[in-house]
Image (cartoon, rainbow, N blue to C red):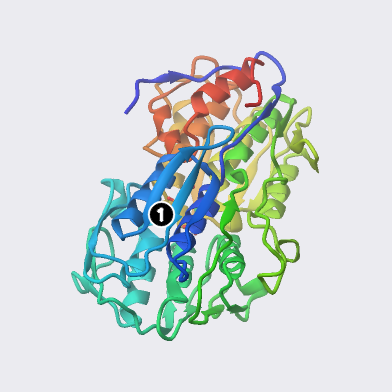
C-alpha cells in the first residue's frame, strides 16, 4: 500500500483535455483472442493500458504458452505482441484482483495439456466464480477441488474440451458468460450459454460478442423473455471454428476511466475533454469479416454512461477533439438504474454526494452485484461517505444519497485495493479540502498514471501527451 495521498481540492471550475489509457475490458478480450488465434500468425494489441490488469492477462497467457512481448506505446499505453498458443500448456496463473483474468482464463486453460492452477490476491478469493466453474463442469471439464466455487482451484486440462450447451446463474457477474464464450470456438462442439437469471452489465457481454465476430467467430444471441435479454433465458451460442483476429487491434480509451475525468468537470462546473475518442476505435478489415466495424455496435456502453451523466444536468458531446463534458452550474439529484454500467457506481455516487450538498437526493439502483466487485462496493461507499459526513444509505440493490450540509475529512478515504474507490475519493477531494486517499496506488489496476494526471488536470497544468 502506498502512503496517504492528498487529493487536490478545486479552487474553480476544472478545465482541460486528458488522455486516458486503453479500456481494460477491450484490452483483455483482444489479448485473449490473439492468444487463441488458430492460424499461428502473430498479432499486436496496440494502445493497451500499461496497468496491472493488462499485465496479469499478458502473464497469464504466457503461462498458458502464448508468446508475449510488451513495448511502450503512445500516450502512456503499451503495445503487446502475441504469438498464439496452438497447444496450451499446464502452468500457474496469478489472477491478482482482475475479474477478466479469473473469469476469462479458466475456460482457455481447459484446453491445456495438463493442470493449470489459479489463485489471486486475498480479496480475489472472495469474488464469485460459481457461474464460470459450474459452466465448465457442464461442458465436461474437471476441476480440483471438484466442487470449486472460488479461487484457488485447478483446471485439469486434457488438451481439448467437448463443449456443448450449459445453463448458468450469471446474476453475480456478466463475466461468467463472457468467459465461457471467449474460448468456445476452440471447443469441439463450440459452446451455447443460457442464463438462468438476470445478467448484469449486459453491454460487456455485447462487447464479447462483437469482439468474437471481429475475430471471425460465428456467434448468435437470443434475448430472454424480458426486455433486451436482461432477465433469465437469454442465450448465446459460439460455433466451433477458426479464430482470426486482425493482425493489429487498436484499443479505444477506457470509458469508465474517462468518466472519472468527466465527473471532475461536472462537480466543478468546468469542461473536460477525453482525447482520442472515438477515433481510436478498432479498424476491422471489412473484406475479412461479414460485418465491417462500422456496422457493429459501440464496444463500450457510451449510451448508458451518457444517460447517467446527463441525468445530473451535464452535457456530453462527441467531436473530432474527443468526448467532452460541460458541467452544469449545479448538479441535479438523480434516480438511475446502473445495472448495465455497475462499475461506474463509485463515480456516480461521488456525483450524487456533491448533488447532496445542494440539497438534492439521489437513488442508484440495479447494482446488488457490485458487492462482489474488487471489494463490496456498496458497503465501502457507505462507510467512506459516512466518514466525511455524507448521508449515504445502502438498499437491497444500490444506494440512496441524501442531502448533507457540509463534508469534512475525519480520516483518510479508504480505497480497499479498489481503483474505483480510490478515484471516487479523488472526486470528492475536489470539494472536501484536506481529503487524503489511503492507497491511491490501487488505481494501477486500470489507470497507472492517475495521481499525476489528476493533479495536473485539477491544477490546470495538464498537457495532452
Ligand atoms: O467483462 C468485463 O470486462 C467487465 C464486466 C463487468 O463485470 P460484472 O458483470 O461483474 O459487473 C464490469 O463491471 C467489469 O468492470 C468489466
Ligand atoms: C469490476 C471491475 O473490474 P473486474 O474486471 O476486476 O471485475 C471494475 O473495473 O470496476
- Which is nearer the eye, 435 or 163? 163
Residue 153, x across and y down, in percent: 23, 63
Decide: is 228 above or below 464: below
Decide: is 47 above or below 289: above
Residue 166, x across and y down, in percent: 42, 82
Residue 238, x across and y down, in percent: 52, 78
Decide: is 346 above or below 243: above
- Which is nearer the eye, 258 or 382? 258
The verdict on label 1 being within 8 Å of ligand 2 is yes
Residue 376 visible, this orientation: no
Label 1: which secondary element: helix
- Screen quadrant of the N terminus: top left
Location of residue 298 (image quadrant):
bottom right
- Screen quadrant of the C terminus: top right
- Which is nearer the eye, 166 or 337? 166
Q: How many numbered badges does the structure rendering display?
A: 1
Q: Which residue is mark 1?
A: 99
Residue 328 visible, this orientation: yes
Residue visible at 58% across and 78% down in the picture: 218
- In the figure, is residue 337 to the left or right of 128? right
Residue visible at 50% across and 29% down in the picture: 449
Residue visible at 54% across and 37% down in the picture: 73
- In the figure, is residue 332 to the left or right of 115? right
Residue 398, x across and y down, in percent: 53, 51
Dot 1 crowding, Cα within 10 Å, few <14, some 14–19, many 20+: many
- In the figure, is residue 132 to the left or right of 337? left
Decide: is 136 above or below 40: below
Residue farthest left in this picture: 145
Amino acid at each position: 500500500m502506498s502512503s496517504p495521498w492528498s487529493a487536490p481540492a478545486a479552487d474553480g471550475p476544472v478545465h482541460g483535455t486528458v488522455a486516458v489509457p486503453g479500456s481494460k475490458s477491450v484490452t483483455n478480450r483482444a489479448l485473449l483472442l490473439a492468444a487463441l488465434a488458430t492460424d499461428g500468425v502473430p498479432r499486436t494489441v496496440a494502445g493497451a493500458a500499461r496497468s496491472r490488469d493488462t499485465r496479469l492477462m499478458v502473464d497469464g497467457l504466457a503461462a498458458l504458452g502464448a508468446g508475449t512481448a510488451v513495448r511502450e506505446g503512445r500516450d502512456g499505453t503499451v503495445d503487446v505482441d502475441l504469438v498464439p498458443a496452438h497447444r496450451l500448456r499446464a502452468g500457474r496463473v496469478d489472477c491478482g484482483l482482475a475479474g477478466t483474468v479469473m473469469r476469462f482464463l479458466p475456460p482457455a486453460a481447459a484446453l491445456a495439456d495438463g493442470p493449470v492452477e489459479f489463485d489471486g490476491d486475498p480479496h480475489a478469493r472472495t469474488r464469485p466464480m460459481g457461474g464460470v466453474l459450474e459452466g465448465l463442469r457442464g461442458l465436461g471439464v474437471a476441476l480440483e477441488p471438484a466442487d470449486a466455487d472460488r479461487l484457488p482451484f485447478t483446471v485439469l486440462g486434457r488438451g481439448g474440451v467437448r463443449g456443448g450447451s450449459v445453463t448458468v446463474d450469471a446474476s453475480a457477474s456478466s463475466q461468467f458468460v463472457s468467459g465461457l464464450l471467449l474460448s468456445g470456438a476452440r471447443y469441439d462442439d463450440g459452446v451455447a450459454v443460457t442464463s438462468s437469471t438476470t445478467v448484469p452489465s449486459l453491454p460487456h457481454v455485447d462487447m464479447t460478442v462483437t469482439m468474437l465476430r471481429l475475430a471471425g467467430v460465428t456467434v448468435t444471441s437470443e434475448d430472454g423473455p424480458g426486455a433486451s435479454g436482461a432477465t433469465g433465458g437469454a442465450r448465446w451460442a459460439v460455433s466451433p471454428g477458426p479464430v482470426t483476429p486482425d493482425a493489429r487491434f487498436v484499443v479505444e480509451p477506457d470509458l469508465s476511466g474517462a468518466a472519472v475525468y468527466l465527473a471532475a468537470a461536472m462537480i466543478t462546473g468546468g469542461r473536460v475533454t477525453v482525447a482520442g475518442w472515438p477515433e481510436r476505435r478498432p479498424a476491422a478489415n471489412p473484406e475479412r469479416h461479414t460485418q465491417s466495424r462500422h456496422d457493429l455496435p459501440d464496444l463500450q456502453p457510451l449510451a448508458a454512461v451518457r444517460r447517467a451523466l446527463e441525468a445530473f444536468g451535464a452535457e456530453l458531446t462527441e467531436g473530432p477533439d474527443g468526448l467532452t463534458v460541460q458541467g452544469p452550474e449545479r448538479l441535479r439529484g438523480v434516480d438511475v438504474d446502473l445495472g448495465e454500467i455497475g462499475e461506474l457506481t463509485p463515480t456516480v455516487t461521488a456525483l450524487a454526494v456533491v448533488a447532496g450538498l445542494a440539497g438534492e437526493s439521489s437513488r442508484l439502483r440495479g447494482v446488488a452485484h457490485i458487492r462482489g466487485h474488487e471489494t463490496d462496493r456498496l458497503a465501502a461507499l457507505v462507510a467512506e461517505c459516512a466518514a466525511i459526513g455524507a448521508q449515504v444509505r445502502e438498499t437491497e440493490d444500490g444506494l440512496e444519497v441524501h442531502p448533507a450540509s457540509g463534508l469534512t475529512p475525519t480520516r483518510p478515504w479508504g480505497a480497499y485495493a479498489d481503483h474505483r474507490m480510490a478515484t471516487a475519493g479523488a472526486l470528492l477531494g475536489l470539494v472536501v479540502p484536506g481529503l487524503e486517499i489511503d492507497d491511491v496506488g490501487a488505481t494501477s489496476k486500470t489507470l497507472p498514471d492517475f495521481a499525476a494526471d489528476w493533479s495536473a488536470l485539477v491544477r490546470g497544468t495538464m498537457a495532452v501527451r
